[in-house]
């Protein structure tokens, strides 16, 4: 009886741990990163926090990736450091620029982090940006309000774009919690990347 109970407890614990691990992987891949990311060689080793000069051609890359049998969806994305400014409040944040049509296919759980009436960047407003709750609270911005998005462009010169707030998202990231989700077209103009999406 003791052996049977011991085995049952071990099997139950292993099942619980497997379930937690699977949930974690699913939440990250379907909610934030996608299953696979493609970067130019040397991108991850680059000492810059946002090596914008190491970008891939969007059309060419999607043309090569899309026909692969195992690929169900592909979406371009850029990540860079910037600032959200409203009135006298300006705060540094990580900017994730996504294609509003392709991104939901790659990360279907991302919209589950949206709070209340939030909509995907670039859908409600062409220049719509979704802010993490921490960032929105720090710069005192609410849905529908106008602000400015600032960032160094590909040559390192500070550039800016007017934006509307499309809503907020709730993140479970304790360290990096000041994040803005922006439409790719707006971000490409902001950082002066002449890439045809």
Image (cartoon, helix red, strand yellow):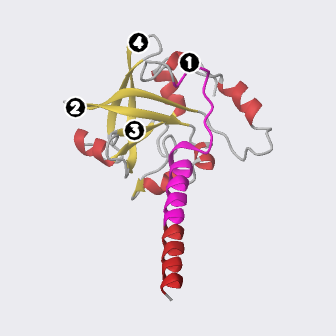
Sequence-first tag of 4 and 1: 1
First in sequence: mark 1 vs mark 2: 1
Query: Which portion, as a residue range, is magenta?
Result: 17-44
Q: Mark 3 falls on what kind of element?
A: strand
Q: Position of residue 72 (x, y in %)?
A: 72, 47
Where in the figure is residue 119, as x and y percent of width and height?
A: 47, 50
Q: Earlier in the sequence, mark 4 or mark 3?
A: 4
Tell me if label 1 and label 3 are in contact, CB under 8 Å: no
Name the residue located 52 percent from the left edge and 60 percent from the top edge.
Answer: 23
User: What separation in Å lies between label 4 and label 1 (alpha carbons)?
Assistant: 14 Å
Tell which residue pokes out farthest to the left in this image. Answer: 88
Callout 3–callout 2 Cβ contact below 8 Å: no
- Residue named by callout 3: 180
43 falls in the magenta region: yes
Mark 3 neighbour class, 10 Å CA radius: few under 14, some 14 to 19, many 20 or more:
many
Q: Residue at x 41, y 23 (%)?
A: 49
Q: Which mark is residue 79?
A: none
Mark 1: give few (<14), some (14-19) or many (20+) Cα within 10 Å: some
Is there a contact, CB below 8 Å, between mark 4 and mark 1?
no
Foreground label between 2 and 4: 4
| Numbered mark located on residue 54 in the image | 1
Mark positioned earlier in the residue sequence (2 or 4): 2
Q: What secondary structure is marked by label 1?
A: helix
Give the quarter of the figure containing the C terminus. Answer: top right
Secondary structure under tag 2 reads loop
Q: Nearer the viewer, mark 4 or mark 1?
A: 1
Q: Is residue 80 left or right of residue 44?
A: left
Numbered circle sitting on residue 156? 4
Instruction: Name which of mark 1 and mark 3 comes first in the sequence.
Output: 1
Q: CA distance from mark 1 to mark 2?
A: 33 Å
Query: Which residue, given by chain and number where applicable, does mark 2 sit on?
Result: 87
> Alpha carbon of mark 4 to alpha carbon of mark 3: how far?
20 Å
């Amino acid at each position: 009886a003791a052996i049977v109970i011991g085995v049952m407890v071990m099997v139950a614990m292993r099942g619980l741990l497997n379930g937690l691990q699977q949930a974690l992987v699913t939440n990250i891949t379907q909610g934030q990163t996608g299953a696979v990311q493609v970067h130019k060689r040397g991108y991850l080793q680059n000492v810059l926090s946002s090596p914008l000069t190491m970008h891939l051609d969007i059309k060419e890359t999607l043309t090569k990736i899309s026909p692969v049998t195992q690929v169900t969806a592909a979406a371009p994305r850029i990540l860079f450091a910037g600032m959200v400014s409203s009135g006298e409040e300006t705060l540094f944040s990580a900017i994730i620029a996504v294609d509003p049509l392709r991104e939901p296919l790659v990360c279907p759980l991302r919209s589950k982090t949206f709070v209340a009436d939030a909509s995907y960047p670039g859908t409600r407003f062409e220049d719509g940006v979704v802010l993490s709750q921490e960032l929105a609270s720090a710069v005192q911005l609410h849905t529908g309000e106008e602000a400015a998005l600032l960032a160094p462009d590909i040559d390192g010169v500070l550039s800016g774009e007017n934006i509307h707030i499309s809503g907020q998202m709730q993140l479970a990231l304790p360290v990096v919690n000041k994040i803005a989700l922006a439409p790719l077209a707006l971000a490409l103009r902001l950082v002066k990347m002449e890439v045809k999406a």
